[in-house]
Amino acid sequence: MRKYMQQPALAQYAGEELFPGVACESDADVLKTFRQVSTSGLHGVATCRMGSDDKAVADPPRRVRGVSGLRVVDCSAMPGLITGNTNRPAMAFAWHAANLILEDRKH
């Protein structure tokens, strides 16, 4: 990134490096800083596929295939990222799953 910002087309717009700063020089220093401060900034979604086919981890009522009594009731079973915060969709997803669980207990 430093080499990129030093290119003539951008150098005139670049100011002083604020973070991690010029004292962070070696690849090891950059990697150490990266590991200390990096985060994805995203919530885990679409990591536990829900569906009807054999590749799905959970079925539509969110039951984990091959594991009795276990369901996926968080954003991991959602099909993909949403454009906003995942808090409310996660709560709605879990609320719906709770209703499914209660319905199953009636049978």
Image (cartoon, helix red, strand yellow):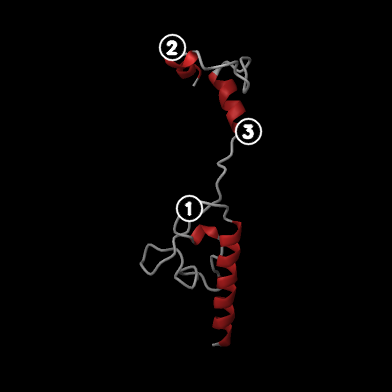
Amino acid type of the residue that numbered disc 3 sits on in the rendered structure: Val
Q: Position of residue 57 (x, y in %)?
A: 45, 63
Residues packed near mark 3 inside 10 Å, few (<14), some (14 to 19) or many (20 plus): few
| Quadrant including the C terminus | bottom right
Kindly identify the residue that appears in the image at 57 percent across and 43 percent down: 41
Above/below status of 70 relative to 47: below
Above/below status of 53 relative to 8: below
Amino acid type of the residue that numbered disc 1 sits on in the rendered structure: Leu
- Determine the residue located farthest toward the left in the rendered image: 53
**Residue 80: quadrant of the picture:** bottom left
In this view, the mark in front (2 or 3): 2
In this view, the mark in front (2 or 1): 2
Of labels 2 and 3, earlier in sequence is 2
Task: Name the element at disc 1.
Answer: loop
Q: Which label was assigned to residue 8?
A: 2
Quote the CA–CA distance across marks 2 and 3: 30 Å
Q: Nearer the viewer, residue 38 or 15?
A: 15
**Quick check: 99 left or right of 66?**
right
Q: Which residue is mark 1?
A: 81
Residues packed near mark 1 inside 10 Å, few (<14), some (14 to 19) or many (20 plus): some
Residues packed near mark 2 inside 10 Å, few (<14), some (14 to 19) or many (20 plus): few
Q: Which label was assigned to residue 37?
A: 3
Quote the CA–CA distance across marks 1 and 3: 23 Å
Amino acid type of the residue that numbered disc 2 sits on in the rendered structure: Pro
Kindly identify the residue that appears in the image at 58 percent across and 66 percent down: 92
Quote the CA–CA distance across marks 2 and 1: 38 Å
Above/below status of 52 relative to 83: below
Kindly identify the residue that appears in the image at 50 percent across and 13 percent down: 12
Contact between labelled residues 3 and 2, with CB atoms less than 8 Å apart: no
